[in-house]
Image (cartoon, helix red, strand yellow):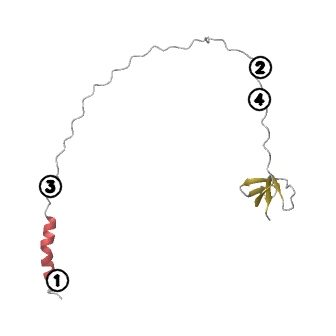
Amino acid sequence: MKPTLPLLLMALLPTLALAQVPAADPTATRSATTVAPAPVVPPPQPARPQPQVLPSPQPAQPIRSTGPARIAPAPAPKPVDKVYDRNGRIVPGVRPAGPNRVFDSRTGRYYDSVPAGDGQQIKR
């Protein structure tokens, strides 16, 4: 086996030598493109200050008065969704928490529910 190793190295020596030779210039086959210089733009002239026109302290037209401000009526209270137990009785302190979920504020627990009439019914 020992005589084959030197023969193998001698066969690979020309390949290794060619790998060290620099290749031709990669841009030699490409067409040369030149970039035109950017046109010289004169610097902008400083802007002349415009005279400031201040609004007059008196409005051009007097503001019409229609009397004291009117108080907007209070919005109607949002109807509270009712939550029923499995016997159909309204459960106090329970409010809807999401689709098919209700929250019992007395116990701090969430329950699954199903739509029932104008509210939700707890599934237990």
Which residue is rendered at x = 14% and y = 71% of the image?
15
Task: Check residue 68 in the rendering and tell me which mark sits there, or answer none.
Answer: 2
Q: Nearer the viewer, mark 1 or mark 3?
A: 3
Mark 4: which amino acid?
Answer: Ala
Q: Is residue 108 above or below residue 51?
A: below
- The picture places residue 123, in percent across and down from the top left corner, at 79, 63
Task: Check residue 72 in the rendering and tell me which mark sits there, or answer none.
Answer: 4
Task: Check residue 5 in the rendering and tell me which mark sits there, or answer none.
Answer: 1
Tag 3's secondary structure?
Answer: loop
Q: CA distance from mark 1 to mark 2?
A: 110 Å
Which residue is rendered at x = 73% and y = 58% of the image?
100
- The picture places residue 91, in percent across and down from the top left corner, at 85, 55
Q: CA distance from mark 4 to mark 3?
A: 84 Å
Q: Nearer the viewer, mark 1 or mark 2?
A: 2
Q: Is residue 28 above or below residue 53?
A: below
| Upstream in sequence: badge 1 or badge 2 | 1
Q: Nearer the viewer, mark 2 or mark 3?
A: 2
Task: Check residue 25 in the rendering and tell me which mark sits there, or answer none.
Answer: 3
Q: Splitting the image into 4 quarters, where does residue 26 fall?
A: bottom left
Residue 110 appears in view:
no
